[in-house]
Amino acid sequence: MSYEKLFSRGSIGTMDLKNRIVMTAMGTGFARYDGEATDEIIRFYEERAKGGCGLIITEITRVDEETGIGLTNQLSISSDRAIRKLTELVDAVQQHDCKIMLQLHHPGRQTASIQIGGKQAVAPSGIACKVIGEVPREMTTTECEEMVQKFVAGALRAKMAGFDGVEVHAAHGYLINQFLSPYSNQRTDKYGGDFAKRFAFLEEIILGIQKVCGIAYPIMVRISASEYTEGGLTIEDAVAISKKLETMGVAAIDVSAGTYESNYAIMEPQQLAEGWKKQLAKEVKKNVTIPVVAVNNIKRPAFAEKLLEEDVCDFIGIARGQLADPEWANKAYMGNDVLIRKCLGCLHCSYSVVLSKPLQCTVNPRLGRETRYNDANLVQNGTGKKIIVVGGGPAGMQAAMVLAKRKFAVTLLEKSNALGGLVKTAEVPPHKEMLGEFIKTQLAELELHNVEVKLNVEATADIVKKLNPYGVVYAVGGESIVPNSIPGIFKGHVWTANDVLTHKVSLAEKKIAVIGAGVTGLETAEVLAEKNQVTIYERDSEIALGLNGVVKMFLLNSLAEKNVVINTNHLLKQVEDTSITVLKDNLKEITAEVDAVVLAMGVSSNKDRLKEFQNEFHHLLVVGDAQKPGQIYDALKTANDKAFAFN
């Protein structure tokens, strides 16, 4: 066994846990529209329980149907009707020696009227959340008392469904957090004013749950140990809240941070290091004797072990890490860290939920689709038949791994001297090192499943045909777009983003025009701006489409610090030896002096080469950018699904 502390037993109240790994709550969008649990959400949580997690906390589960919906397809515990399917969920998780708690939630002002049937959101005070931009209605004293009872009723239903305990969500700027914080609570009745009155709403909920569920029924409370907002809760407030909760008999404190107005602290993008806010949990732990669970942007088991060794917390909260790999815990226990598909911090997960899509993960194409795409459904009918995979990017490696698990004899051919495709360049910009970790994991997967890899092979259709394969996976990555219609585009000082990120060219003390403000363009500009004066030109009005807003904010702040100028609605028309001409706002041509031009205009697939393979092979799978240029998630999803279904 690796990681002695991480895999030591522990207790939260009356719950005996097999290890210190807690899957903390994260919205999924897998429930039915009316909030009932589905087979998909049951299988989702069961996979993490099978994967070795000690305790699972469900996603935000609403206690109120009138104003309590904060997420499309969010779980509900607001009526007895929810109990039947939630009992199935509990049974599915507990059979794997994993405990499960239900998280009780109300968004307060952090929901939009469109989510609650056009009604006005409710809150302690009529103060708008700056992110939502809608002024909520201040709850009456009677409404506050009634809402307390809705939380209590939700807890009782959770106990009836068999949950091992409940977590009261008093963090992240949601309703209970709003009562606790002087920033959002300006009431003058018994629920507002000094600390004791602001605490009263949460206090009544805890006392109510203890009354109906019994004093021994485990209650955990999630808090924001700092709101990172002027006038909001501080670590001193968090300590006071935690100490008060301990005296009331709460079983544990789950320490997080932030609100929607400081959502970077909740979402923790790739720009924030593992453990960046560990001091918050450590301060809470110093002041209470009950267990502390802490989320800290954890990706690696070794870092989780380090937090326990440093006495930062008693239990490790890791949600996104177990989205990326449901076997995170089991692989860590066996010392197979390299086989863990680690969270990239790209926030594709939260971005998908914001768009009202089911939860997705860049590196896990099976996420949320476990009822279909699981190893039990993987038909192992390859019987040693030969498969040739052409292209060693993420899509090619994913397809190779799935087909090898199906008992095909897989050989992967890559034209360069290393696997990874365009991801090898994508990991170069700052804070993208986890992409390199992902490639290492894919390489380990290929080795584990005996995929033969041949590098420096330019695999034409004729060469592949001579190998006499049963089937071929065409996973040739996209090529940088270089529009030959633009005069001067092939001049010697014009490069692609790929040229820069692969160090084919080194530029210093130059005036550089980066053409394109997609993710690649912005990140390439960030690299170039270390030693150059950089201006970005984007033909459209929007930049970095498809990038999570929090990641985008950090990236734009970095570019601003490096004095990078971004010009939208600027279309490149011509490249001269020392200048470029761009069309501004589709009205006026302007000229800018440059020493070099870097093209970040996207990628396209080589259709002619693809046709050669289509003409030669009947059993042909086209995956990744070869099918349609897109993000890593798209490439892995097409590769996984086609390899899964291949006959």
Image (spheres, rainbow, N blue to C red):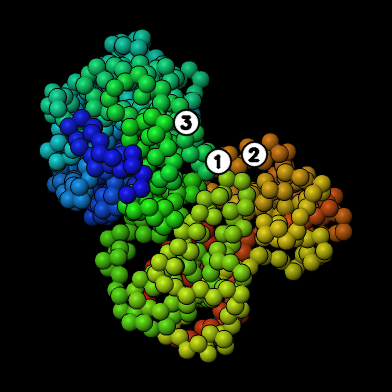
Q: Which residue is mark 2?
A: 558
Q: Are marks 2 and 3 in contact (CB under 8 Å)?
A: no
State the residue at coordinates (35%, 16%). 240
Tell me the CA gap for discs 1 and 2. 10 Å
- Tell me where residue 538 appears, x and y as whole percent: 68, 51
Which mark is drawn over residue 271?
A: 1
- Tell me where residue 42 appears, x and y as whole percent: 24, 51
**Tag 1: Cα neighbours inside 10 Å, few (<14), some, or many (≥20)?**
some
Q: Nearer the viewer, residue 205 or 586?
A: 205
Q: Is residue 177 visible?
A: no
Q: Nearer the viewer, residue 628 or 295?
A: 295
Q: Quarter-wise, where is residue 72 in the image? A: top left
Quarter holding the C terminus?
bottom left
Q: Which residue is mark 3?
A: 277
Foreground disc of the pair 2, 3: 3
Question: In this rendering, is residue 269 above or below 105?
Answer: below
Question: In this rendering, is residue 616 above or below 216?
Answer: below
Whichever of labels 1 and 2 marks the residue nearer the N terminus, that label is 1
Kind of residue at disc 1: Gln
State the residue at coordinates (18%, 26%). 209
Q: Is residue 389 visible?
A: yes
**Tag 2: Cα neighbours inside 10 Å, few (<14), some, or many (≥20)?**
some
Which mark is drawn over residue 501?
A: none
Foreground disc of the pair 3, 1: 3
